[in-house]
Structures are given as structure tokens and as C-alpha cells.
Image: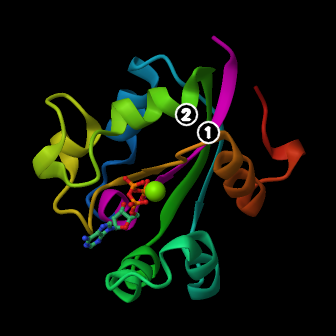
Amino acid sequence: MAIERTFSILKPDATRRNLTGAVNAAIEEAGLRIVAQRRVRMTREQAETFYGVHRERPFFGELVESMIAAPVVVQVLEGENAIARYREVMGATNPANAADGTIRKRFALSVGENTVHGSDAPETAQVEIAQFFSGNDIVG
Ligand code: ATP
Ligand code: MG
């Protein structure tokens, strides 16, 4: 298996409830390394670009509003098979369907407030990392 990098967001429901440390502990316990991290307030434009693939979906407006409602923590995670591994650690999009022990099962409030984002493929990971970090910001 290859060492990969994936892009992660601790979403507003996590920062609002003071859960960034708890989520980071789950990430690190899963063997993923946090190699870049920054707390930011996303602009509407950034959120719309980031979730652009969902622009036509009925929940797009709600999704963008939720991402700009409070600060987020953007991260780059590194590890073996990091993209799939993090998706596994996050759990299903809807916490009602998430496996026991996953971040979303433990912390998410609803499908709209589901605590974390993780890239879904190498191509999207690369684009998403580049939207928020330059090479010098990532220290492996
Ligand atoms: P993410 O991209 O945030 O990691 P995901 O890949 O598990 O999540 P996507 O299908 O990409 O799921 O959906 C992006 C985000 O849109 C979800 O994390 C969720 O917050 C929101 N979302 C998805 N489906 C719904 C829905 N039916 N109602 C409300 N929000 C939704
Ligand atoms: Mg997604």
C-alpha cells in the first residue's frame, strides 16, 4: 500500500461543540498523521467552490450555509491508504448508517451536520488540498 495524503475538514458542528481535539485524537489513533492544519472561517465562495460538485442537489444551499456558519479546521492527513482509511474512520455520510466507533457515529448530529469531510479519491484529494494549502504548509 502506498503512503497517500487526503484532505479533511472538521466542520462547524465540531468547532462549535469544542470537539476538534476529540476528533483529532480519533484520527491519530487510526494511524493517520496530521501533516498540515489551520482553523479558518470559510467564505461563501470557498464553500461553493469546494462543494461545487453538489451545486444542483437540493441540499446545496443548506450545505453551503452550514459550512460558513462557524469556523472549520482544514487539514492534510497522511498515511498508508489515507484516502480510503479516513473514509472508513469517518463512517457513512448519514450518522444513522455509520458503523460503531466511527467519527460520525460518535459525534455527528445529522446528515447535514456530520462533523467531518474527507476526500473521496486521489484526484479530489489533490484538488481539495491545493484549494487550502501550498506545498510549504505541509510538513510530513
Ligand atoms: P463529505 O464530502 O462532506 O466528506 P460525503 O462524501 O460522505 O461527505 P457527499 O455525498 O459528498 O458525502 O455529500 C457532501 C455533504 O453534503 C455531506 O457530508 C453532507 O453534509 C451533505 N449532504 C449529503 N446528503 C445530504 C442530504 N440528503 N441532506 C442534507 N445534507 C446532505
Ligand atoms: Mg463527498
Callout 1 crowding tier (Cα within 10 Å): few <14, some 14–19, many ≥20: many
Q: Residue furthest top?
A: 1
Q: Quadrant of ligand 1?
A: bottom left
Query: Looking at the picture, how far across and down is residue 12, in whole percent?
Result: 38, 66
Q: Secondary structure at mark 2?
A: helix
The kind of residue tagged 1 is Thr
- The region drawn magenta spans 1-15
Say whether residue 115 is left or right of residue 128. Answer: left
Residue occupied by mark 1 = 6
Quarter of image, res 138? top right
Say whether residue 98 is left or right of residue 26. Answer: left
Query: Looking at the picture, how far across and down is residue 89, in whole percent?
Result: 35, 31
The kind of residue tagged 2 is Ile
Residue shown at 52% from the left, 46% from the top: 120
Residue occupied by mark 2 = 83
Query: Looking at the picture, how far across and down is residue 42, in whole percent?
Result: 57, 75
| Visible residue check, residue 53 | yes
